[in-house]
Image (spheres, grey):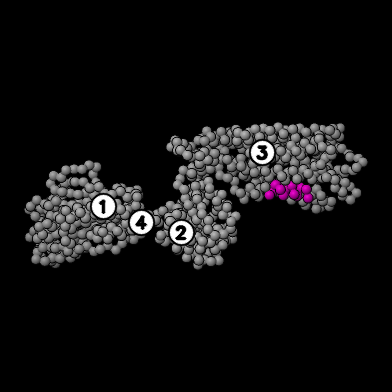
Amino acid sequence: MIYTDQVMTLVLFDELSTLGALVRGVTSATSVMLVIFYLYQWHYGRSTLYSIYVQVVTALVYGLAAVGKGDWMFARVAFGDEIRQVALGRYIVWMVTCPVMLFGFFGLISMLGPNVEPVKVNFMVMKDLLVMAFGVTATFQENQTVQYIFLACAITTVLVFMTDVYYLERVRQEYFAQGDLLVWLHGITALLFISWGIFPLMYFLGPPVLNIMSHEGDVIGHAIGDLIGKNLFGFGMWYMRYNKLLPYIQSQGNAVCVYTGYELDPESHMVRYSTHMVVPTPEHDEEEGESEKEKSRVWNAEQRVKILIIEPAVSFQRLFMYMLKDVNVDAEMALDLNHAKSILRRGRVDDFETILVNLTTHFDRPNALKEFKKIVSEEPFQVPVLGYTFDDNCLAMLEKEDKRNELTHGIVHHVLDEVFLGDLVRHWAQTSYLWRETSRAREVESEIRRSASSLHLIRSSAGKTLRDMPEFPSSTSGSGAASSSVKPMDDAEFNAALVARQQALLMQTPSFYQPPQMYMQPPQPQMQQQMQPQMQQQPQPQMVAMPASPQMQQPQGGLQVQVQQPTLPRKNSISVPNSPVGSLSRQNSFSQGSPVASLSRQNSFSQGSPKAAGLSRQNSFVQGAQPITSLEGAGDSTCSNDGCSKRSEMICGGCHQATYCNRDCQLAHWRNGHKQACKK
């Protein structure tokens, strides 16, 4: 179509010369009414600046085009002897309004489920701008070959853009599967395709390409397209947000964001997203001082975590502060490793639970980073170090060379995802807490070992190997009686030692440890029967530590002190049953997180000692042992070991039939086959 100063040939709508101004006026008036409506809703918090901005621009553009002198949206461009009218103003208006509407669309579909990735949003906005850039460039081309090249680029970009929107809508369907929300998601996406598809159609039918539509028809078609694509589509997004999605979310528990399902893999430190509606419990609703914004996110109910971020760029420091403010994470910034060391040393040792370090700026100094990791991993800090980078090449190099375990304790793969970062930091904060509690448990264990050297302790549940335990006192045979190298204590001395040990536990153990309870219980009848071969008199009172009973019982035949250790979760036991060593039985049990080790011991003393005769002490904090041990007073029988005819001095504590002259014979007989017979 060729336009000149003298004549303009109309192919369509040639008799409706004023219809274009009328349609533009209707579009402008509609935008003005929507601006008033959105401002009224803004007063009640039911509108966004996106909607107001788009309608203000549309109202001004079409208002000036309808009542102004001349058509300012078109520019006259000379192509040789021809003068063409190019809608340059129209492209400018699209460039300043279409990206804003896309941001509003992405925010709408992100109300249910996780946010759309910022990278995907930016690329889709860039594709929209590229379509308009290719189109306006093709319009200015006088050479048809070059014009068709730019048109092909524009068409390809349009197809890619529509494909991205389609697949994005497919991905979000699982989050809109409740009620009629899925129908609204399909409807708003279809309206986007239809309304925005009008403009490429008008471009090809109009003067720039096929030239089968007049100037007036081109103006009317684009005005109708803006009426549907900006006014109707914008109002549809507003209605879906404030009359469909928000009421549904509020009906599920007054929550604003429901993308709260995250499963953390501790090994790879990755997050798998899932979505479910969060209904606040009455306890959370009754908490005083908790804002509505805090109620809308489940992680706000958790304990706040403080981290140290080593980032030299001030812009990234501000980005981290903005990201972490809504996920209950307090961050303090350091410029380099030396600055971080000074921050750690000037405060308390447990001020920070995790440290983040930029690997891009420290990749060329691995030794300094290794030294820093070693310092903060040991006492008194015991803080894990996590590495992050904004450079994909650096991250790939770390994975390839397997340096992440050398430089840091882990790598943050999604550093720009604030929800993932908050979950990951909280995960490593629990690791730091475990390290510190393990250290305290070791200190308590050392104090117990020093204060009660006669107790044989094992390492707490956080350790992997047993500590070196002092040897059990060995008894030697002589003059027909076995003796012990341990000096026996009377009841008063034993009670005093037990009380002193309890006081040490109360002063040194962590907060989760509870002191043992003591109560009285009569001695076991089985123990009295075992004492009969040794002595004919009534057995002396014995001190036995066993699992506690709910109530105190009055002793009837003797005194028995029982110590109860509170049961802790996830108990792991290490026991040494059926020990072949005479008068030695140990059963060691510990609970995870508790530094207190438990064991069982029974010492036999010679008949010559009046206090030791018939006196047995057995200490246990979790479970009493049934020892296979030796008892003196085996009678006049001979040793049961093959090849030995000496007089027996002890009997087997398991079967109560085999007798031995000393422990060596007992051990030899045990290895020669008595082990199986005794178990039966």
Can I make out residue 195 in this image? Answer: no
Given the image, on which type of amino acid does mark 2 rest? Arg
Q: Earlier in the sequence, mark 4 or mark 1?
A: 4
Given the image, on which type of amino acid does mark 4 rest? Arg
Cα–Cα gap, marks 3 and 4? 58 Å
Between tags 2 and 4, which lies in front? 2
What residue does disc 1 label? 502
The numbered disc on residue 51 is: 3
What residue does disc 4 label? 440
Above or below: residue 48 compared with residue 456? above
Secondary element type, mark 2: helix
Q: Earlier in the sequence, mark 2 or mark 3?
A: 3
Question: Is 350 placed left or right of 512 in the picture?
Answer: right
Q: Nearer the viewer, residue 147 or 106?
A: 106
Q: Earlier in the sequence, mark 1 or mark 3?
A: 3
Secondary element type, mark 4: helix
Q: Quadrant of residue 107?
A: top right
At x 83% / y 52%, what residue is drawn?
Answer: 143
* Magenta-highlighted residues: 126-137
Question: Is 352 placed left or right of 453 in the picture?
Answer: right
The answer to whether marks 2 and 3 mark residues whose Cβ atoms lie closer than 8 Å is no
Given the image, on which type of amino acid does mark 1 rest? Gln
What residue does disc 2 label? 346
